[in-house]
Amino acid sequence: MARRPKPEEIVAKLRQVDVLVSQGGSVADAVRSIGVTEVTYYRWRKEFGGLKVDQVKRLKDLETENQRLRKAVAELTLDKLILAEAARGNY
């Protein structure tokens, strides 16, 4: 199974396709040259198109932090519900 490319690598590959297409190549040939399917290319372009490498790094950092905070809120909410049940004498 192939490893998943890092966001910075994806941005570089998207730029590579842009260069090849601007030189007169077809999108299909350019996508094939970076070693992915057209479906993957368009999914990457939707997610990362127009971003610079530093913006992609920041986006991924924020997504990771958001995931961590969501987990913390879920755990605290569960703790609160357990304490509320115990306070009512339903333990």
Image (cartoon, rainbow, N blue to C red):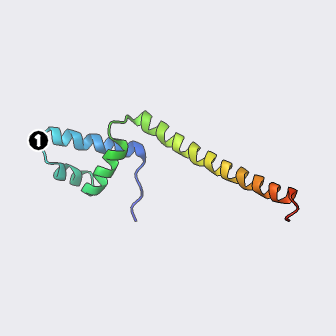
Q: Quadrant of the C terminus?
A: bottom right
The quarter of the picture where residue 89 lies is bottom right
Q: Is residue 36 visible?
A: no
Report the front residue among 37 and 76.
Answer: 76
Q: How many marks?
A: 1
Q: Residue furthest front?
A: 88
Residue 42 in the image: above or below residue 89:
above
Residue 53 in the image: above or below residue 73:
above
> How far across and how far down the image is residue 49, in percent?
32, 40
At 57% from the left edge and 48% from the top edge, which residue is drawn? 67
> How far across and how far down the image is residue 86, in percent?
85, 59
Q: Which residue is mark 1?
A: 24
Q: Is residue 13 visible?
A: yes
Residue 79 in the image: above or below residue 15:
below
Q: Is residue 84 left or right of residue 77?
A: right
Report the front residue among 60 and 80.
Answer: 80
Specify the amino acid type for callout 1. Answer: Gly
At 42% from the left edge and 58% from the top edge, which residue is drawn? 3
The quarter of the picture where residue 90 lies is bottom right
> How far across and how far down the image is residue 20, in percent?
18, 42
Q: Quadrant of the N terminus?
A: bottom left
At 76% from the left edge and 56% from the top edge, which residue is drawn? 81
> How far across and how far down the image is residue 31, in percent?
23, 51
Element at label 1:
loop
Q: Is residue 5 left or right of residue 29?
A: right
Q: Is residue 72 left or right of residue 41?
A: right
